[in-house]
Amino acid sequence: MTTYDAAKVVAAREIRVRLRDKTFIFSTVFFLLFAIAVTVLPVVFGDSSDKVAVADQAIAARLQQQPDLEVRVVADDAAAEQLVRDGEVEAAVVAGPEVIALQDRPGEVVNALSTQPPVRLLDPDAVDPFLAYIVPFALAFVFFFTSFLFGLQIAQSVTEEKQTRIVEILVASVPTRALLAGKVAALTLLAFAQVALIAIVTLIGARLAGLDSGVLTLLQPTIGWFVAFFLVGFVMLAALWAGVGALASRPEDLNGVSQPVQMAVMLPFFAVIFLGENESAMRILSYIPFSAPIAMPTRIFNGDTAGWEPFLTLVIMAVTGAGLLAAGARVYEGSLLRTNGKTSWATAWRSRTTG
């Protein structure tokens, strides 16, 4: 059996196991619900159209021009006032004209009847502040938890095989690099499939929610680039997670030996969250391999990137990923068969096995 064939066998086994794993199923359902909540639920539960009753036809016609107002034409002012008292409408316009309501001042109705000066927007293409916050947060949230959960699963799988001594049987029949490649390929495929599914559901939800076409124009390339960056970024970290699993001899040791990789995942998450409004910081973060999967799509959404920048960042990440894959493979090979306690990074690096 060639190394390639052996890696395919290992990958197929890992995929079958993970598809039955409750953690994978729960995380997929959770992220899909999260995507729906971000796009659809605010529209479903956030219908802010105010109902207003009015008897005067001229005033009714004026109010009907406002998309956020639902106008009910009634026979007279008394009927309009009664609807307000019954709670069927938020406001009514009676003779005067006078706007009446029960408790809260109906600002939409008052503004619709007021004469307002013309407004000139200096930056009409600026991203809505709420979207400018929620989109980077959602990207960071998905990348952080998905890469962390799947990476931890790789490490736990390796550690469990070491603890039960199954790895000794596997290494006797399967080359060590094939074992590593199969695990990394399987979890990368599953993580990519999960993120791609989340991206599709998010875009469908955004369309069903009736988001502004300008927002969709920004959101579509942002999500597309995020999926590409996620794939390269996850592969970049996956071999390191496998190496971490090989360093530990039991699951209890994982937290200690995985600190460097955990920091590589956590720091970009908090950097983008806290520095998202700092253009200079985001520009730098978008070229650092560990933070680029979040920072660069965020800049794309904000319209702060030139066309060549995402491609350059992908090249930087790919080169870094190749180096980290080699480093992770060396640590993995150097510690996989060491079962007498935790293995240090330095020891694993010096004592790589062959095969």
Image (cartoon, rainbow, N blue to C red):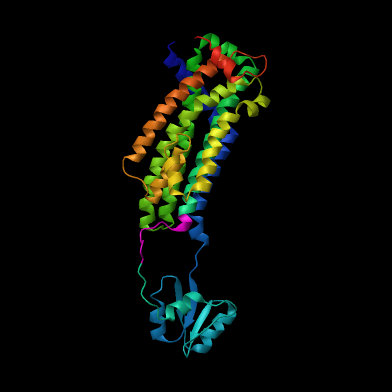
Q: Is residue 298 magenta?
A: no
Q: Residue at x 59, y 34 (%)?
A: 22
Q: Nearer the viewer, residue 207 or 177?
A: 177
Residue 34 percent across, percent down from the top left: 53, 48
| Count of marks placed on residues | 0
Range covered by the magenta-colored residues: 121-131
What is the magenta segment's predominant secondary structure? loop
Residue 89 percent across, percent down from the top left: 53, 77
Q: Is residue 34 left or right of residue 321?
A: right
Q: Answer yes or no: is residue 335 visible.
A: no
Which quadrant does the N terminus fall into?
Answer: top left
Q: Residue furthest front?
A: 280
Residue 179 percent across, percent down from the top left: 51, 17
Q: Residue at x 44, y 57 (%)?
A: 209
State which quadrant residue 310 falls in. top left
Q: Examine the rendered structure and indicate whether residue 237 appears above or below residue 137.
A: above
Q: Nearer the viewer, residue 283 or 94?
A: 283
Q: Residue furthest bottom?
A: 96
Q: Residue at x 46, y 23 (%)?
A: 325
Q: Residue furthest left?
A: 307
Q: Is residue 129 magenta?
A: yes
Q: Examine the rendered structure and indicate whether residue 108 appears above or below residue 134.
A: below
Q: Nearer the viewer, residue 74 or 330?
A: 330
Q: Residue at x 54, y 38 (%)?
A: 267
Residue 58 percent across, percent down from the top left: 38, 85
Q: Answer yes or no: is residue 265 visible.
A: yes
State which quadrant residue 318 falls in. top left
Q: Is residue 262 left or right of residue 289?
A: right
Q: Examine the rendered structure and indicate whether residue 270 appears above or below residue 216.
A: above
Q: Nearer the viewer, residue 124 or 179?
A: 124
